[in-house]
Image: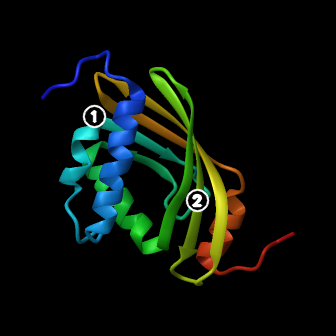
Amino acid sequence: MTMSSTTDSVTVLTGMYAAEAEYLAAGGPGEASFNVLAPFFALNVELHQADALPYGGTWRGHKGMTQFFLTMGQVWETFDMVEQEFLATGETAVVLTQVRARARATGRELSFPILQTITVKDGQITEVRPFYWDTQAIADACAGSAPTH
């Protein structure tokens, strides 16, 4: 089944988040196959993470996404999307996610929001830009350094 350019972004994102849950339930990075997620991402997808994060930078294509998930798995022991709200649903969707996570290096648990802009074209995600409320708190929890303020 091929998706048309009129495919609703919510349908694509709902499918992707369900596939991500399936991927993580199957063991996630290093265990499960990225193939369950691949159909939701364009071959030239770009994921832009804040540079201050342990997994910061731009991740490109399916290979980049696979590496991103591996890196996330090394950083986080758990990373649960507790609640999601779709705030806008055009070609660029805006999704607010409440996360509860435990850093692998320190065992510290954090709860934080991520606001993502996600561009969907021709039924696939082409760009993801997550915005974090406090990248320093996340970096500190992952590195084990004490808060600076």
Image quadrant containing the C terminus: bottom right
| Amino acid type, mark 2 | Val
- Type of amino acid under label 1: Ala
What residue is rendered at 72% in x and 56% in y?
134
The image's colouring method is: rainbow
Specify the label residue 42 is tagged with. Answer: 1
Q: Is 126 rendered above or below residue 32? A: above
Q: Tell me the element at label 2.
A: strand
Lateral position of residue 121 relative to residue 75, left or right = left
Which comes before the other along the chain, label 1 or label 2?
A: 1
Quadrant assignment, res 42: top left
Residue at 50% x, 64% y is 80
- Front residue of 11 and 47: 11
Q: Position of residue 93 (x, y in %)?
A: 50, 29
Which quarter of the rendering shows the N terminus? top left
Visible residue check, residue 137: yes
Circle 2 residue: 99
Please say whether residue 65 is visible from this viewpoint: no
Percent x, y of residue 87: 59, 32
As drawn, 3 above or below 86: above
Q: Return the x and y of residue 76 as percentages of the image width and height.
A: 49, 72
The answer for how far apart the CA atoms under marks 1 and 2 are is 25 Å
Q: Are marks 1 and 2 in contact (CB under 8 Å)?
A: no
Q: Nearer the viewer, mark 1 or mark 2?
A: 2
Mark 1 crowd level (few <14, some 14–19, many ≥20, 10 Å Cα): some
